[in-house]
Amino acid sequence: MLNPSKKRYRLRIIDPVYPAFNIYSNIAKLTTALGPVSVATCANEVEGWDVEVIDENNLRLYGPKSPSGGANHDFLQQQRPADVVGLYGGLTSTIPRLYEITHLYKAKGIITIAGGQHFIEDNIPEALHSGIDYVVIGEAEDTIKELLQALEGKKDINEVKSIAYLKDGQVLLTPKRKPLIDFDRLPSPNFSLVRYAKIKLYPVGRIRGCGMNCEFCTVKGKIRCASPERSLEDIRFLVETNDARHFFIVDDLFGQQRDETIRFCNMLKDYQKSIGKRLDTVVQIRLDKAKDAHLLSQMRQAGINTVAIGFESPIEEELEAMNKHVRPEDMIALARAYHKFGFLVHGMFIFGYPLKEGVRFELSANERIKRFKEFIKKAQVDTVQILLPVPLPGTELRHRLMSQNRVYATADVGWEYYDGNFPLFEPDAPITAEELQRSMHKIMGKFYQFKYMFLIGLHIFSFPALIFFLHNIRAGWKKWYRPWRNNLIRFGGWLIMKGWTSEFKKGGFAQKLKEAKKHLQLKKG
């Protein structure tokens, strides 16, 4: 328990740094995770508590950086001692860093709390035996308030719902809290609590839960949605307090609850008119929403310019394994429908998804690469993200692969490699794990190339000629902007790929993979 003589306490919530440079590293410097900010905002309402968020991936404003990566927590404790530390375990690849931070603070006698659906909740015993004092299960906005009061001695710890802790070496679980339904009662996330960060792209949440039941994902359950009024208030708050212009609506399924989504789009459009400013918004949306022309029209009028779509794979057998009920040829037509409405399409793919037992299908790495490239070209995808399958804890995919004895031991290939950039299990024949990773690089390397630097310059010089030819500045801009923007991003992607390749060579993963494959074969006997 906390020192009862203190008049005020401090909670520091930490978002651990990525284990190494990867495809997310650059965007992480422009944004931050929504979850830690939402929880911190609620905790900040508890009387007698000061709350701050440290995002180790975004320490751009004179942040106290550690030479080994992340924040200098010794410095932070000297400047502003925390009484309780909360750790965001929403990304499996950051778990080793999370435990490292935990041990650092435990050595100083600080109480530690952790939560996160992708890892912590499915590895509660491991977390508690790794120095975490309390694991928060599920949504933490209400739990964090009760837990802080319990740590002050104002509430019995067993009255705090949805937590786990150790007592006499045994894991104790308190009664579960029902999922949040009334989001309107929560305060708007306060990003000013994030210290040292320079945020340009602000995350906004509207829908929680997902009924798609994808095998590789942990997000399940009935969809719960905030009102359009509340969603708009979150954006308005950011515009007025942070002069925000760029937003990313983090919901996996923008467009669900169609009528409410359209009402939100209309409110967002009217708000922009009232302030005389155009906002830029990115959303994640299902591919089949392209069939709803009215929805797409309202989205465009609301300033939604980019859609991120999980195509996953252009190979029908892999789509079936993922529980995706769509054909590759239909996906091409639907992707083009988004283009017709002027959206920039960001395509997200998984290369080498493992087939289910009983499915007879063999395809070489080169043939798979060919199919991916052809699909991306035909679908006219503006930007791509190619990842490898990740058997995340708690997913059906992990359970299936573990039962087949195909997953490499974490003692050989640790949690830090669970970011989609590394092979983590024995792939389907005839592809090897090494080919799996090389294939991903080949597809990305074809899409993001150095040559686009020259095309950027050529495109700039073409603008006046295009305006002259069309006799219309607005029409010329629309025709000119998309390819210019894509050339810029593809050159930037080449720089990212170059940096990632350099980090990969230094990391010694090839040797780790060799050992992991050897141990897996010994285990199989």
Image (cartoon, rainbow, N blue to C red):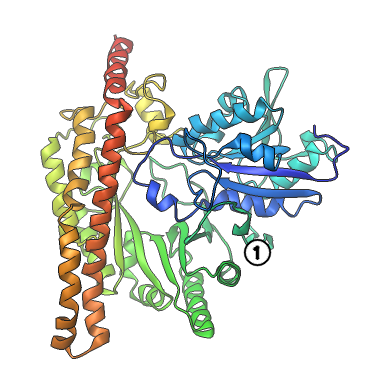
Give left or right: position of 441 versus 113: left
- Quarter of the image with the N terminus in it: top right
The residue closer to the viewer here, 240 or 155, is 240
Residue type beneath disc 1: Asp
- Note whether residue 262 is visible: yes
Q: Quadrant of residue 18?
A: top left
- Note whether residue 319 is visible: no
Image coordinates of residue 370 in percent, x first then y, are: 12, 46
Which residue is painted at 72% across and 27% down in the image? 109
Which residue is painted at 47% across and 70% down in the image? 245
Considering the numbered disc 1 on the image, is that residue within a helix, a strand or a loop?
helix
Give left or right: position of 221 versus 480: right
The residue closer to the viewer here, 393 or 102, is 102
- Quarter of the image with the C terminus in it: top left
Total tally of numbered discs in the picture: 1
What residue occupies the far right of the structure in this picture?
A: 5
Name the residue tied to disc 1: 184
The residue closer to the viewer here, 355 or 115, is 115
Which residue is painted at 27% across and 37% down in the image? 502
Q: Quadrant of residue 183?
A: bottom right
Which residue is painted at 17% across and 70% down in the image? 459
